[in-house]
Image (cartoon, grey):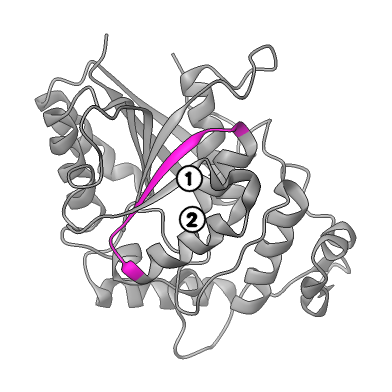
Amino acid sequence: MIRPSAKEQLHERNRFRAGYNFARLIAASPRLEPFVLPNAHGDASIDYANPEAVKALNQALLKDAYDLEWDLPAGYLCPPIPGRSEYLHYLADLLGVGSASTPRRTPVAVLDVGMGANCIYPLIGAREYGWYFVGTEVDPVALKWAQELVAANPPVAGLIDCRLQESPLSSFAGVTKPGEAFDLSMCNPPFHESAEAAAEGSRRKQRNLGTKKAKAVLNFGGQAGELWCEGGELGFVGRMITESAGRPQLCRWFTTLVSKSDHLPRLFHELDAVSAVDVQPLEIAHGQKKSRILAWTFRR
């Protein structure tokens, strides 16, 4: 059984565990250089309140670690790369394919519910583990951008299939094919219940970053499907649990991120109500940010 980590550090296989070597990152992606300046301690860093600096850092991290070409359209969610890769490493542990003695390229099929324009989980997962991904997306603009990212990276292009999800209230219906099955599903669900709640989260984040910008954008971007949905995170995951119970053989493990620990008791209750055989909450941490993966299965 996988146990939640008690350490506030990145996974042992996380390529960013040792921190950032900015000289190396600039060599990999020169567009980062204008954003790198000494911080208050005299160390090389960037202004993490500057969306363009964060995007340039992401481009350098992905190029240096995975030889991936990556970009993002204006207004879409810019993900923290080390934290996103954490989810994938913990899923590898869940499947038992992450140890040094086990070949990393064991065939694994993953369904990424709501991959976003950034397509970050399929890109990293295909490059890191050689997994096959089906990524779904409700936003046609985001879907097209993700498809272009996949096409721009030939080493992983054959491992990622991007599909349009026409119903924002469905996770699996309409995007999976008859007889199709996956080892894993994964999801970073919308957290907020409304645009207003997302805007308040944006203001709170910017206050924490110490910036006075009046029109901040949460996580430096984000569309409705990325940041808010009907019922917020609890509503989204609750619908996913109900839908998974109707298709218990679709995935060996159904998983999702859960941003708030006080959401777990209700989700545990819902999983008990649909007779999930095994439920595992896996705590992950990236710096001061804590989250958790909720995994469940109907297989014995």
| Residue type, mark 1 in image | Ile
Mark positioned earlier in the residue sequence (1 or 2) = 2
Residue 50 in sight? no
Q: What element carries label 2?
A: loop
Query: Residue 25's spot in the image, x, y percent?
Result: 82, 60
Q: As shown in the figure, which amino acid type bears the numbered disc 2?
A: Cys
Task: Find disc 2 in the rendering and name its residue.
Answer: 119
Give me the disc on residue 160.
Answer: 1
**Rendering coords of residue 157 (x, y %):** 55, 48
How far, Cα to Cα, is label 1 from label 2?
Answer: 10 Å
> Picture quarter containing residue 130?
top right
Of residues 290 and 28, the one nearer the viewer is: 28
Residue closer to the observer: 168 or 156: 156
Q: Are dots 1 and 2 in contact, CB under 8 Å? A: yes
| In this picture, residue 105 sits left or right of residue 282 | right
Tell me the residue at 42%/66% (across/down): 144
Residue stretch rendered in magenta on the structure: 129-140
Count up the numbered dots.
Answer: 2
Q: Give the quarter of the figure containing the C terminus.
A: top left
Q: In this view, does 43 lie above or below 276?
A: below
- Residue 117 visible in rendering: yes
Residue 248 x/y as whole percent: 19, 24
Quadrant where the N terminus lies?
Answer: top left
Q: In the figure, 172 relative to 146: above or below?
A: above
Image point (65%, 45%), residue name: 155
Is residue 94 shown above or below 284?
above
Q: Which mark is residue 104?
A: none
